[in-house]
């Protein structure tokens, strides 16, 4: 039985229904504010077991899990936290802690040949910089620009060593 809503009333077969209509099942298109009670004691939902063709339009969806058998198209931003594995084709923006556990990282190339490969770019790689007091601690090898003494320096695991502190016209390099 198809119902037609006119203003605040629903009309079917010249019968006008005003107010709330309650049923165990509706067949056909349902528009307006659809609410209901879950049909099982363990489920809690406002609109339970929605189905339709071709589309169901809702405002917000809150779910503890989802199984999608087809394509998903998002017209905005997808935000999710505490994710350990992301398989992405395209651009990924992360707040912090991006770890590449397999393969090589290419900057300006789709075929990197080393762990970090920026050889296909022609500009530069920006190094970390800071004062002598801001040097990182630890026993790992580091490379950075020291703004206190205007020198490129590296840490060999024991000492900070200046790679170059002055430019000589002959192109000489001073190693510490």
Image (cartoon, rainbow, N blue to C red):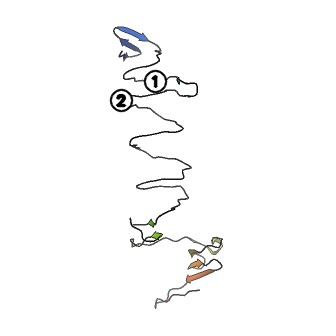
Q: Residue at x 46, y 33 (%)?
A: 59
**Relative height, residue 137 to residue 37 (above, below):** below
For label 1, the SS is: loop
For label 2, the SS is: loop
Answer few, some or many: residues within 10 Å of disc 1's Cα (few below 14, many 20 plus, some between 14 and 19). few
As drawn, the label of residue 53 is 2
Tell me if label 2 and label 1 are in contact, CB under 8 Å: no
Tell me the mark number nearer the camera, choosing from 2 and 1: 2
Residue 117, quarter of the rendered image: bottom left
Residue 129 coordinates in the image, percent (x, y) = 56, 71
Answer few, some or many: residues within 10 Å of disc 2's Cα (few below 14, many 20 plus, some between 14 and 19). few
Of all residues, the one furthest to the bottom in this rendering is: 170
Give whichever of discs 2 and 1 has the lower sequence position. Answer: 1
Real-space CA distance between mark 2 and mark 1, rounded to the nearest whole angstrom? 16 Å
Quarter placement of the N terminus = top left
Residue under pointer 1: 34
Q: Residue at x 52, y 47 (%)?
A: 80
Residue 2 coordinates in the image, percent (x, y) = 35, 16
Residue 101 coordinates in the image, percent (x, y) = 52, 62
Residue 123, quarter of the rendered image: bottom left
**Relative height, residue 153 to residue 111 (above, below):** below
Q: Residue at x 63, y 70 (%)?
A: 136
């Amino acid at each position: 039985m198809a119902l037609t809503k006119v203003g605040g009333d629903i009309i079917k077969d010249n019968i006008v229904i005003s107010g709330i209509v309650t049923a165990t099942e509706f067949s056909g298109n349902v528009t307006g504010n659809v609410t209901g009670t879950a049909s099982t004691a363990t489920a809690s939902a406002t609109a339970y077991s929605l189905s339709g063709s071709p589309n169901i339009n809702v405002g917000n969806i809150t779910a503890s899990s989802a199984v999608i058998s087809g394509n998903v198209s998002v017209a905005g931003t997808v935000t999710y936290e505490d994710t350990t594995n992301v398989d992405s084709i395209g651009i990924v923006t992360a707040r912090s802690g991006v770890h590449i556990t397999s393969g090589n990282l290419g900057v300006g190339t789709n075929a990197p040949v080393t762990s970090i490969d920026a050889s296909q770019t022609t500009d530069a790689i920006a190094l970390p910089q800071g004062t002598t007091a801001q040097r990182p601690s630890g026993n790992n090898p580091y490379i950075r620009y020291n703004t206190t003494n205007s020198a490129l320096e590296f840490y060999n695991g024991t000492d900070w060593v200046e790679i170059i502190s002055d430019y000589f016209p002959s192109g000489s390099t001073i190693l510490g």
